[in-house]
Image (spheres, coloured by chain):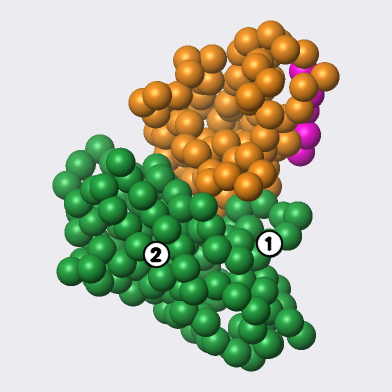
């Protein structure tokens, strides 16, 4: 199993600000990483796959980067509707594993 | 549009069994791998199980291996999760999620559509 280490566990920024979340793998997973947004009471929503490919319909203020063992999700121009918990997920090896999550709040 | 609707959850005693069903629509079900992901109260997302498009591949988290069984019916566009020997730590919201499209060579094992989830509560 590949445990995904995600940090910080929570972060806050002002509306219009920028937030960066990091996910680390103990071994290379190439570009096989996805990012999800989860709001309470809602279904999780995929934002990014292949580490940096934005899913169709997702606002361009979301961006992903990284390869191998370190990855990041950046939310630019933070909006109130971006509040929620964000998770990374590796899809290189089974069992699939998620990071512990990062709660994003507005300052 | 893609729809995934879970059912079959509820309250069960420790050691008991439940079968979850995910009813799907809006896509060619037989092309896609399908999975189950859960969220314990106050915790994060936790992978449970994954099944190939024709049931030839099945995978489980270590925590459920030997107790849970995933299956699917491509004639009815349904995916199931049979849960036996349930424990208190299996309590949570269970999500059905769509995985890779085997006909797309560039697709990989992420979950691009999710259901709203169904609650499973195991009492000790």
Q: Mark yes or no: residue A8 visible.
A: no
Front one among A102 and A91? A102
Q: Which residue is mark 1?
A: B40
Viewer-proximal residue among A24 and B41:
B41
Q: Kindly identify which numbered label has been placed on residue B90.
A: none
- What is the number of callouts on the image? 2
Label 2: element kind: strand
B50 sits to left or right of A19: left
From the viewer's perspective, is A107 left or right of B99? right
For label 1, count other residues whose C-alpha is less than 10 Å away and answer few (under 14), some (14-19) or many (20+): some
**Dot 1: element:** loop
Q: Residue at x 20, y 51 (%)?
A: B28
Q: Which residues are magenta?
A: A9-13
Which quarter of the figure has residue B77?
bottom left
Magenta includes B50?
Answer: no
Viewer-proximal residue, B51 or A65? B51
The answer for how far apart the CA atoms under marks 1 and 2 are is 19 Å
Pinpoint the chain carrying mark 1. Answer: B
Residue drawn at 67 percent across, 74 percent down: B121
Relative to residue B62, is residue B29 depicted above or below?
above
Please name the residue shown 63% across and 25% down the image: A82
Q: Which chain is green?
A: B
Residue B50 image position (x, y, % from top left): 40, 63
Mark 1 and mark 2 residues within 8 Å of each other at the beta carbon: no
Does residue B120 sit above or below A15 in this rendering? below
Chain for colour orange: A
Task: Name the quadrant of the N terminus of chain A.
Answer: bottom right
Chain under numbered label 2? B
Label 1 vs label 2, nearer the camera: 2
Outermost residue toward the right in this view: A107
Residue designated by label 2: B22
């Amino acid at each position: 199993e590949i445990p995904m280490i995600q940090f910080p566990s929570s972060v806050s920024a002002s509306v219009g600000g920028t937030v960066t979340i990091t996910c680390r793998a103990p071994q290379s997973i190439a570009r096989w990483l996805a990012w999800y947004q989860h709001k309470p009471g809602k279904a999780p929503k995929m934002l990014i796959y292949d580490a940096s490919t934005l899913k169709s319909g997702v606002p361009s203020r979301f961006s992903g980067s990284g390869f191998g063992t370190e990855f990041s999700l950046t939310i630019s121009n933070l909006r109130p509707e971006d509040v929620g918990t964000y998770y990374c997920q590796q899809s290189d090896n089974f069992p699939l594993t998620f990071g512990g999550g990062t709660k994003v709040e507005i300052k | 549009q893609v729809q995934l609707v879970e059912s079959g959850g509820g309250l069960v005693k420790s050691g008991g069994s439940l079968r979850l069903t995910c009813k799907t629509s809006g896509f060619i079900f037989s092309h896609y791998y399908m999975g189950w992901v859960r969220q314990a109260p106050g915790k994060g997302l936790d992978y449970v199980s994954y099944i190939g498009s024709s049931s030839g591949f099945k995978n489980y988290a270590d925590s459920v291996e030997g107790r849970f069984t995933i299956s699917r019916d491509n004639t009815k566009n349904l995916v199931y999760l049979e849960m036996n020997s349930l424990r208190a730590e299996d309590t949570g919201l269970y999500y059905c999620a769509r995985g890779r499209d085997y006909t797309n060579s560039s697709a990989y094992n992420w979950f691009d559509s999710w259901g709203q989830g169904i609650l499973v509560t195991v009492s000790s």
